[in-house]
Amino acid sequence: MAARHSYRLFDVTLTRRTQVSPSLVRFTFTGPEVNQMATHAPDQRIKLFFGEAPGSLDALFDVVHQHQDEWYAAFRALPEAKRPAMRTYTIRALRPESAEVDVEFVLHGDTGPASRWAMRAQPGDRLAMTAPIAGPESAQVGFEWKPPRDVRRILLVADETALPAAAGIIEQLAERAGPARVDALIEMPLRGDVQALPSSAQVHWLPRDATPGCAHGEHLLRAVRDIDLRYEIVALGGKAESSETIDEPATDQAFWEAATVDDSAPFYAWVAAETKVALGIRRYLVNECGLPKRYVTSMGYWCEGKVLG
Ligand SMILES: Cc1cc2nc3c(=O)[nH]c(=O)nc-3n(C[C@H](O)[C@H](O)[C@H](O)COP(=O)(O)OP(=O)(O)OC[C@H]3O[C@@H](n4cnc5c(N)ncnc54)[C@H](O)[C@@H]3O)c2cc1C
């Protein structure tokens, strides 16, 4: 996931739980070394470890203590019953001066260890977290939000799991205003999940409960089609028809394709959602809109019916 020495394991304790909306809870953690944590971008990814079996977090910290830089292999070798479940999340906010870090969880029921923890968590609960280390010798890795300097058009596409990252991106765009026009398409479970965000982006909230029987991602796919990107790409100097195509079938494996734009690129898309949804949007942008693949970052944040770990 990240270069060695740029991430490390932190021992964190929950201090506050804040209901952001019916489907999203913000957890504020502290810990003796959170003042040494760093975040480099609004989509900074971290790993959280959930010790459902008694003593499993202690086993993880023992492994790190004994194996230092090689701890991850030793962690994977722990017997399953003693190995805490590991899941990927986003740093929503970091306040090193007060040793606090916020992470927002989607509540999707009791089906996985992370959501199960989030439904019941109370101040005082302990977790382990791998996160970037502050300091000049620490490489800035573990994020994909890398907009080109001269970008004129940005498309953000997120489902609820990527809302913490997308909200952070929109807030950052408000602080570092550029000339780019930004559309943010955000699909959430409920109308009540809409939250206030800065006007640096035209935010299109797409609650699924507004359309009974609506499948996950259906609104996102429709909303992307509703934006006439083919016309815009030509206007920005791109080609109407790209020679590139994506024809992989929908996948139920982890899916991750990062853009490789240089600073002169006029267009940038950041897409994070359920795997098949993210792939479907990528296929539309490249195959039908003629967008070069290198302008599009597409990430499967989770996979319906599967555990990615
Ligand atoms: C880079 C990155 C950043 C992420 N940031 C966040 C974040 O900030 N907040 C956040 O909430 N999630 C985030 N996620 C997504 C999160 O890692 C997954 O949702 C994860 O599967 C949750 O783990 P779990 O233990 O609850 O469920 P798992 O044990 O992984 O899965 C159990 C079952 O639940 C299903 N499932 C998993 N997630 C959901 C969901 N959201 N809705 C419905 N069903 C689901 C799975 O398909 C599976 O069938 C991020 C993922 C990535 C890759």
Image: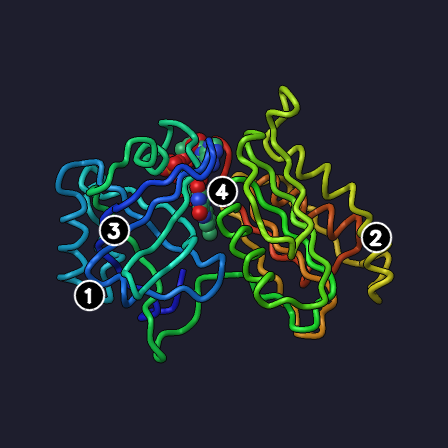
Kindly identify which residue carries mark 2.
230
Q: Establish whether ligand 1 lies closer than 8 Å to the Cβ of label 4.
A: yes
Amino acid under disc 1: Gln
Secondary structure beneath label 4:
helix
Q: Pointers 4 and 1 in contact (CB under 8 A)?
A: no
Q: Which of marks 3 and 4 is nearer the N terminus?
A: 3
Classify residue 206 by image quadrant.
Answer: top right
Q: Which x, y percent locates residue 251?
A: 57, 40
Q: Which x, y percent locates residue 121?
A: 27, 36
Secondary structure beneath label 3:
strand
Kindly identify which residue carries mark 1.
68
Question: Dividing the image into four equal quarters, which quarter contains ligand 1?
Answer: top left
- At 38% from the left edge and 69% from the top edge, which residue is drawn? 3
Q: Residues within 10 Å of mark 2 (few under 14, many from 20)?
A: some
Q: Between marks 1 and 3, how big is the CA–CA gap?
A: 15 Å
User: Relative to residue 12, is residue 42 drawn left or right?
Assistant: right
Kindly identify which residue carries mark 4.
161
Q: Which of marks 4 and 1 is nearer the N terminus?
A: 1
Compared with residue 139, is residue 31 higher up or lower down, i.e. above or below? above
Amino acid under disc 4: Thr
